[in-house]
Amino acid sequence: MLILARHAEAGRKGGWGGPDLQRPLTPQGLDQAEGLVARLDDYPVERILSSPAVRCVQTVEPLARERLLQVEEVAALGVDADAAQVESRFLHGEASNAVLCTHGELIERLFARLVPAGLAVEEPLCWPKGSAWLLWRVQHRLHARFLAPLALDHRTYAG
């Protein structure tokens, strides 16, 4: 099983004056990051891998705290990453019971590869900020289930 998460709300690229990799989550995004902890409560998580972008790391930090895990920053999950490499490395390779936090652009490219290859999915494909997709295999077929964003007040849950 693998969980593919899109970073939470980080505002617009044009509204941030610094380098895009340093763009942080908004207060709404921090709430969505706390919501991800609750959304994934019933799933085993043994590793947390993230794009090095601050907004991605911040999205999974509350989950890492809750599960007593480290966030592993992985350049291969960056906004311009190669979807084929992500598929072979993580979906067919080294990640199991892991959360991968990345960007909408990479998720779009990854699904563009997976759907024609027979991805079994019942929901319409979408990946709003703060959402996740649960991915698992039954025999040789990859299945996916959408996990909608959930926002919880980060001031209540931050510890």
Image (tube, rainbow, N blue to C red):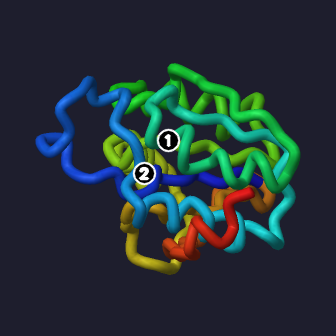
Residue lying farthest to the left in this orientation: 14
> Which amino acid lies under the numbered mark 2 shown in the image of this protein?
Phe
Give whichever of discs 2 and 1 has the lower sequence position: 1
Asked which secondary structure carries label 2, the reply is helix
Up the image or down, 72 lies above or below 58; here it is above
Up the image or down, 87 lies above or below 38; here it is above
Question: Residue 106 at x, y = what percent?
Answer: 39, 40
Q: Nearer the viewer, mark 2 or mark 1?
A: 1
Question: Residue 62 at x, y = what percent?
Answer: 68, 53
For this view, does 128 lie left or right of residue 89?
Answer: left
Residue at 69% x, 28% y: name it.
72
Q: Residues within 10 Å of mark 2 (few under 14, many from 20)?
A: some
Residue at 44% x, 42% y: name it.
55
Residue under label 2:
111
Residue under label 1:
56
Q: Nearer the viewer, residue 9 or 83?
A: 9
Question: Residue 93 at x, y = what percent?
Answer: 73, 30
Residue lying farthest to the bottom in this orientation: 122
Up the image or down, 110 lies above or below 130; here it is above
For this view, does 90 lie left or right of residue 75?
Answer: right
Residue at 51% x, 20% y: name it.
75
Up the image or down, 50 lies above or below 97; here it is above
Q: Residues within 10 Å of mark 1 (few under 14, many from 20)?
A: many
> Which amino acid lies under the numbered mark 1 shown in the image of this protein?
Cys
Asked which secondary structure carries label 1, the reply is helix
Which quadrant of the rendered structure holds the N terminus?
A: bottom right
For this view, does 105 lie left or right of residue 110?
Answer: left
Question: Residue 87 at x, y = what percent?
Answer: 56, 35
In whole angstroms, how far apart are the C-alphas of marks 2 and 1?
19 Å
Labels 2 & 1 near each other (Cβ < 8 A): no
Residue lying farthest to the top in this orientation: 75
